[in-house]
């Protein structure tokens, strides 16, 4: 499983304040905590705190000073990415683009040039997909664009767009069906990623719902996830689901080994 | 029509492990042996790098093992002396390193003292200048007594010491850290325990980059396919990024094959099986040759003709 740590996001008050006041320590601390908890990528999101490329680069530099993990750049503006992608020490993950040609054509040249990867949200001009078929159609559009830019399917992380269970209960099964079909696109297949916690928005049993849905997504091919990597029970559920799917080899201390 | 590219690309490599230390490196070996480093499965040169050939270790013991005469006679009188046997393995059979088993320390087989065992290690190190693998006798309590002395006697020689098991690993970790040797991590034909032993070694502070994995070898016809699939599955997991399974792998072919009837029973007892003097070494060589395909990096071999046969296979295909 590719764990993408979501905590360095200006939606959190401490991160927003750190950006405004230029306090690198807060960013570095969260980078370290998430790395220690097993993150494979550190997501950085400026949110509404700033729209200046130099602030995004500052965040990336702060993370890179602390840990040597690749960055997930949570931004879809070419003017920002053109500055941010080149300063990444390891090929970053660009988070994200929709299936719209204009957006992909603006972002993919930067992604391809730097050997980076990109999250493709399976939505288009018409908005969020309503069923599995629309998701698969949009995913196909993104994958063919990736090929046009001579990128490998492994540089694409398809996001089936997770919707809140409480408000759109019929969507969860469609998302699972779509994820399963993404895995059949190519060999090697594209990665399948999601922002997991959307599923539990507005619910009272958030953590339980996140865990159950994570396990079900893994059974349908999910191999990357944007999450709170410090949520131990969630991570344990994911590690266990991967064992159930025979994607990693069982050992009695598999949980302890991950946390080492 | 364009053919699809079916080459696998793995994200990781097998750990590279070097055994032995030359004078400049603090030991007395004439050369070192490096194994591992592969970025794909055996023989698939079109997919990735296979930087080091598998190596052959000559089976040597401090007392003569209970072997059939077809093997002991092929080795000759040197089998009675570990240093002479080791020297013959190197000079006549051309092995890359020596695997020394201290069978005589077994409480039921002579119960040799730690000092006696350490002396044998010292004598073998003097007799040959290739790297050395040192094994206890297999009795955990006794091995915990003899291995510290043997490790001391080989300090600085960067040996491979065996074996750490799920039930017994702390002593070996301590001595290998102190005397700077590498460790054999042993599991009883069980990939899950193999992984667990590696986790335990890591938790005890031992660097897995200094570990060679050992799934108690099976002779051809006696669970060979179980071990084969474990070696292959472990290798694929390692190549795909499971750092706990990325160690090179060892097979003790000589130590296993000479216990099974196909390698031991004479043709007058089993008519139609063919001449034993050819069948025995062939059984060993074929068993080893097949483990090469599964991902074996070190093969411990006993019969001189099996060594020769395996060398030809390695030189031809690797």
Image (cartoon, coloured by chain):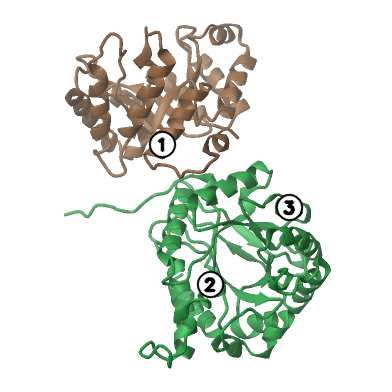
Residue at 42%, 61% in the rendered image: B226
* Dot 1: chain letter: A
* Dot 2: chain letter: B
Indicate which label's residue lies in the foreground, 2 or 1.
Answer: 2
Q: Residue furthest right?
A: B115
| Placement of B273 over or under B259, stated as above or below | below
Residue corresponding to mark 1: A242
The answer to whether marks 3 and 1 sit on the same chain is no
What is chain B's hue in the picture? green
Determine crowd level at label 3: few under 14, some 14-19, many 20+ residues with C-alpha closer than 10 A: some
SS label for mark 3: helix
**Is residue B299 visible from the viewing direction of this image?**
yes
Query: Foreground residue, A62 or A236?
Result: A236
Indicate which label's residue lies in the foreground, 3 or 1.
Answer: 3
Residue corresponding to mark 3: B171
* Mark 2 vs mark 1, CA separation in Å: 35 Å
Image coordinates of residue B55 in percent, x first then y, are 56, 70
Q: Are marks 2 and 1 in contact (CB under 8 Å)?
A: no
């Amino acid at each position: 499983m590719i764990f993408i740590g979501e905590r360095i996001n200006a939606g959190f008050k401490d991160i927003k304040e750190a950006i405004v006041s230029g306090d690198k320590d807060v960013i570095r601390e969260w980078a370290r905590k998430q790395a220690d908890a097993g993150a494979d990528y550190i997501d950085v999101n400026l949110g509404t705190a700033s729209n200046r490329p130099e602030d995004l680069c500052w965040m990336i530099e702060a993370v890179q000073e602390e840990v040597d993990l690749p960055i997930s750049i949570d931004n879809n503006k070419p003017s920002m990415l053109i500055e941010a992608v080149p300063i990444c020490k390891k090929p970053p993950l660009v988070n994200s683009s929709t299936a719209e040609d204009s957006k992909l054509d603006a972002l993919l040249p930067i992604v391809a040039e730097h050997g980076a990867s990109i999250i493709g949200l399976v939505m288009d001009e018409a908005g969020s997909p309503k069923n599995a078929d629309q998701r698969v159609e949009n995913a196909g559009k993104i994958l063919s664009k990736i090929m046009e830019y001579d990128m490998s399917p492994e540089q694409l992380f398809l996001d089936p767009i997770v919707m809140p269970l409480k408000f759109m209960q019929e969507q969860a099964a469609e998302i699972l069906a779509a994820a399963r079909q993404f895995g059949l696109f190519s060999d090697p297949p594209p990665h399948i990623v999601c922002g997991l916690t959307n599923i539990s928005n507005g619910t009272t049993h958030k953590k339980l719902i996140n865990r159950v849905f994570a396990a079900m997504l893994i059974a349908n091919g999910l191999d990357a996830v944007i999450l709170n990597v410090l949520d131990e029970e969630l991570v344990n559920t994911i590690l266990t689901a991967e064992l159930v799917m025979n994607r990693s080899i069982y050992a009695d201390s598999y949980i302890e080994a991950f946390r080492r | 029509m364009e053919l699809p590219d079916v080459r696998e690309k793995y994200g990781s490599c097998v750990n590279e492990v070097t055994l032995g230390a030359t004078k400049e490196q603090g030991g007395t070996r004439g050369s070192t042996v490096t194994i591992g480093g592969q970025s794909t499965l055996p023989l698939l040169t079109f997919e990735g790098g296979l930087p080091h050939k598998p190596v052959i270790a000559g089976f040597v013991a401090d007392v003569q093992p209970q072997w059939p005469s077809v093997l002991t006679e092929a080795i000759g009188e040197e089998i009675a002396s570990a240093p002479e046997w080791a020297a013959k393995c190197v000079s006549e059979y051309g092995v890359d390193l020596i695997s020394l088993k201290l069978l005589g320390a077994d409480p039921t087989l002579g119960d040799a003292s730690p000092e006696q065992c350490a002396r044998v290690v010292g004598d073998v190190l003097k007799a040959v200048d290739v790297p050395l693998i040192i094994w206890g006798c297999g009795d955990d309590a006794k091995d915990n007594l003899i291995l510290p002395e043997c490790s001391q006697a080989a300090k600085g020689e960067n040996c491979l010491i065996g074996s750490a098991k799920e039930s017994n690993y702390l002593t070996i970790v301590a001595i290998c850290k102190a005397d700077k040797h590498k460790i054999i991590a042993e599991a009883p034909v069980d990939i899950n325990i193999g992984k667990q032993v590696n986790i335990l070694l890591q938790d005890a502070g031992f660097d897995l980059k200094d570990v060679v994995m050992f799934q108690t070898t099976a002779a051809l016809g006696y669970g060979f396919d179980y071990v084969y699939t474990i070696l292959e599955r472990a290798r694929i997991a390692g190549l795909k990024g499971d750092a706990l399974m990325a160690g090179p792998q060892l097979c003790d072919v000589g130590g296993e094959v000479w216990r099974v009837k196909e390698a031991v029973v004479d043709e007058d007892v089993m008519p139609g099986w063919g001449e034993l003097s050819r069948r025995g070494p062939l059984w060993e060589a074929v068993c080893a040759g097949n483990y090469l395909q599964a991902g074996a990096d070190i093969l411990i071999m006993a019969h001189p003709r099996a060594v020769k046969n395996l060398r030809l296979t390695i030189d031809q295909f690797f």
